[in-house]
């Protein structure tokens, strides 16, 4: 049994994510009785266990979506629909160094770690100590603690540990981190921003004009269907909005006058 | 300069993907003049080159989206919006073995290879020899030739090389490959299907009821905005449809009566 | 004060629809106290009333959306987003005769009556007596009782009262009413169908090929935004589906062989 | 044959809108030969005509969508998807007085005239004389010339002809017309705004806070399907954006301090 997160699927379709330690003992409580952790430890992925009241549970390998949807959250998390496309746009490979701020609940941190592990590195900044603790806890449960460096800091001051191959920015005022970000990214490195409001997107686009290029703005909508072959139709309700995604690349050296690193916002006024 | 695909970005925003061989010679023609391949070979990622007519070109590392959008295509390709979420649902890790059919133009083959390389393996079946050649050419240009095994075969007969950790199925009648697929997948392994029509989704859902579980159906819509901070608005036109995504997991052993491997469709009638 | 429905808007943004009779007496209970119906009867549209506990209420003229959203419902109602476009496609004018089946809760009946009143006529068929009663009650409250004829009947047998200028069909198996519908519609008359599932749309399209032309299929999505100028963004959740709209025109005489009226479904097999 | 617009439907699915005068003479040219206007004049709605080269044409009554989609345009027109829902929100009845600015190409003018005719009135302001001429021409072809009053004026100065039962505002800076609009609308009257950009919506929402209530912001998406029963699927491309719709009601008298009519924008600064 691989040590780490295990995805449990019950016959009523409910799911749970369980982190298994090598020294796991005692029991794990579910809505259908308790599982012996010792039994889980010996179980194979793809096998079936029974709870103390006889409910059957499939023991499966979690997908990245399973890991993201089951983080304990104190903040709006980055949803799989946005995380999946962002990984593809950032073009992360095992061994890459990637910067993130803010850590939030650590969902996107897990996605970035997934993409650069085992040999890569995620450095994530968070100003709120409570969020940083939560992010570290979620990343650890997902099995990526050794890939991620958690820093209690505000990226608008400075970003250490560069040069980075890519970055993911999810803060209220991303324009305030552009100058340090420019300095910390490799020339041409891709960066993704997630923003809930149109006002923030306008503000960011204005600031990106100095030092960044290849800018794209989009939103992603996922529409789920009721999987009934005789009555195939979309679900009555869907997620209408999580955030806008803005993608750009850090400009390369010696491109043109406007390429000088962006000045701090206060200096702009 | 890393050997392999290079992403070229011109100052008019146009893009190109160039595959660089260690023995690259001569020139590469662009819409803004020609580049010396010898110069490209010595250039650093993140630097600037000039064509023979003085046009400047950024030399960048391609993202997975860049690789997918620039495959030479004779078929409808799998688009990044669908590929990104599918990788996340399949939960592929370096070292995994993944099965695909059909190869088509090889776009999704590249995405799968990206996710399991360097140590993993993609086995892709294609019935049309012309498509198989094209897929091999596109995968080679993307730098993943050594990760992919191309097979000129019809998966409805049998699927060799298992057990597989996951699968991606993009054929006209996916229900015809479910029996061999069940036999070739690890218990609990995730599988993704891409289907253009609602009729095909209904047909597949009907057949999935034997041998597969945890079924989801959705479609993904990407809505792009004009990145103008003073006039932020969506593009006038958007992609209305590429295909429906169906996700499921191969049932585990000994689950219930209906778990017996699905019989061939002709037997169903 | 115009006798009929009155739209009440409270200062907390809540709304109510009140039907005022010329002999209105007593009080009307709201979540913010009671209103004297005698006062309402004397109030002008666009004025303000106070409840017995001092809450202020705007007295307004209801829009068609207000009327539709406030019907008492025992069925899925036709939503304004679908009703508004349907009226425009049916091209209804005052004086037109329009056929509907089934009446359901009467929401679409109100929309049709709105479009053809005062001089026109809506004939609506409903098989369920309980729905027919509810529809009549809702249409009466909306002030259109004198424009609508309610018939307790199944349109698949026959449709009386033609020729009709247009029709709206909202039944489980619309293909069963096509033959009588063809006979009851004027040549070239537009007809709209509302269907929740893709399977029903496929079935209807198959049957429409005989006797109907100019076929369109679409779905309408409404996406609401939080009206906050400093944080403009879509609502987190939206309606993902109500139904598919199919529009067609009854074929004209002597067009071509396939124009013979569609045969009953049982005959098709 | 009713004098006025006639909707022509060819057997290849192409469509045309023809305005028939009582003294129509000569021929009307189509892509499939010419029609004798004298013949059209005598034809019944729902009948078939033949061009001089034998092509058959259905003679039909146009829907409101047919009228809107066939206006001659020099501007972005208001699309049926937005016009249909707007009529429903404005709750227009025959006999109502409605104000519009700007006229643009006259598409929405036709929709408003459709809703209030025969006894109502549309007053439409347009600053560009060329647009005003075009709007008048399109409205006349649609058969509503006697319902509409065209005014070459800028609504930000003053709006004559009130009180109005409703209004539709489609100008670049709608906040500049709010003060005259407040003065010209009946208390509680609904008003609709159409705006292409998020920046404009933010600006308008800011200004609406004085003098208007019951504010809603939404966008409408129409998704068309290929009407093939064996391969039902959405069209590959769809309209991604036309504009944002903002709905509000003119506040009633004596509501609260903020109800004083909005001051001109320059005064706001």
Image (tube, coloured by chain):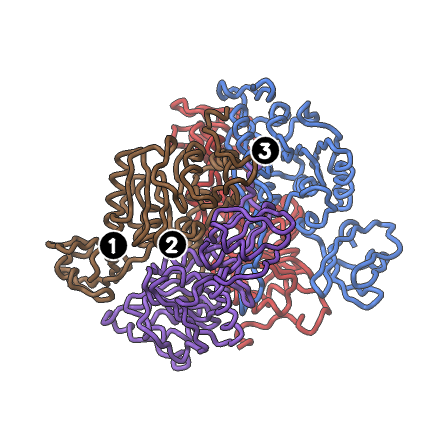
Chain colours: A purple, B brown, C blue, D red
Which mark is nearer the camera, 1 or 3?
Answer: 1
The CA span between labels 1 and 2 is 29 Å
Q: Which residue is mark 3?
A: C191
Mark 2 or 3: the one toward you? 2
* Residue nearest the viewer, comparing C243 with A180: A180
Of helix, strand and loop, which one carries label 2? loop
Q: Residues within 10 Å of mark 1 (few under 14, many from 20)?
A: some
Ranked by sequence position, the earlier of labels 1 and 2 is 1
Q: Is residue C222 visible?
A: yes
Q: Is residue D17 visible?
A: no
Locate residue C222, reporting x and y percent: 56, 51
For the N terminus of chain B, the image quarter is bottom left
For the residues labelled 1 and 3, the Cα–Cα distance comes to 50 Å
To which residue does mark 1 refer?
B16
Q: Residues within 10 Å of mark 3 (few under 14, many from 20)?
A: many
Q: Position of residue D190 (x, y in %)?
A: 64, 57
Tell me: residue D175, above or below residue D52: below
Q: Are marks 1 and 3 on the same chain?
A: no
Dot 1: chain letter: B
User: Is D87 rendered above or below residue B9?
Assistant: above
Q: Residue at x 39, y 32 (%)?
A: B156
Which type of secondary structure does the marked residue at label 1 adopt?
A: strand
Kindly identify which chain the residue marked by label 2 belongs to.
B
Residue C193, position as x, y percentages in the image: 59, 35
Q: Residue D237 appears in which quarter of the rendering?
A: top left
Q: Residue beneath label 2, please?
A: B93
Labels 1, 2: front one: 2
Q: Are marks 2 and 3 on the same chain?
A: no
Q: Secondary structure at mark 3?
A: strand
3D distance between C-alphas at marks 2 and 3: 53 Å
Report which quarter residue A100 is drawn in.
bottom left
Q: Residue at x 73, y 36 (%)?
A: C148
């Amino acid at each position: 049994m691989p040590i780490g997160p295990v995805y449990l699927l019950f016959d009523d379709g409910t799911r749970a994510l369980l982190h298994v330690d090598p020294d796991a003992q005692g029991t794990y409580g579910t809505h259908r009785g308790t599982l012996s952790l010792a039994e889980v430890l010996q179980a194979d992925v793809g096998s079936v266990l029974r709870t103390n009241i006889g409910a059957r549970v499939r023991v499966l390998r979690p997908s990245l979506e399973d890991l993201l949807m089951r983080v304990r959250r104190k903040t709006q998390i980055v949803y799989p629909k946005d995380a999946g496309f962002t990984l593809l746009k950032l073009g992360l490979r095992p061994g890459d160094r990637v910067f993130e701020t803010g850590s939030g609940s650590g969902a996107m941190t897990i996605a970035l770690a997934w993409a650069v592990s085992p040999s890569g590195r995620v450095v994530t900044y968070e100003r709120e100590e409570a969020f940083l603790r939560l992010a570290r806890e979620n990343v650890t449960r997902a099995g990526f603690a050794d890939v991620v460096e958690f820093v209690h800091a505000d990226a608008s001051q400075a970003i250490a540990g560069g040069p980075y191959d890519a970055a993911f920015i999810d803060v209220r005022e991303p324009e305030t981190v552009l100058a340090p970000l420019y300095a910390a990214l490799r020339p041409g490195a891709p960066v993704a921003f997630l923003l809930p409001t149109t006002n923030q997107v306008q503000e960011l686009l204005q600031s990106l004009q100095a030092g960044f290029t290849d800018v794209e703005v989009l939103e992603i909508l996922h529409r789920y269907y009721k999987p009934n072959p005789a009555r195939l139709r979309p679900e009555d309700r869907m997620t209408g909005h999580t955030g806008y995604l803005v993608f750009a690349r850090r400009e390369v050296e010696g491109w043109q006058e406007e390429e000088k690193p962006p000045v701090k916002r206060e200096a702009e006024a």
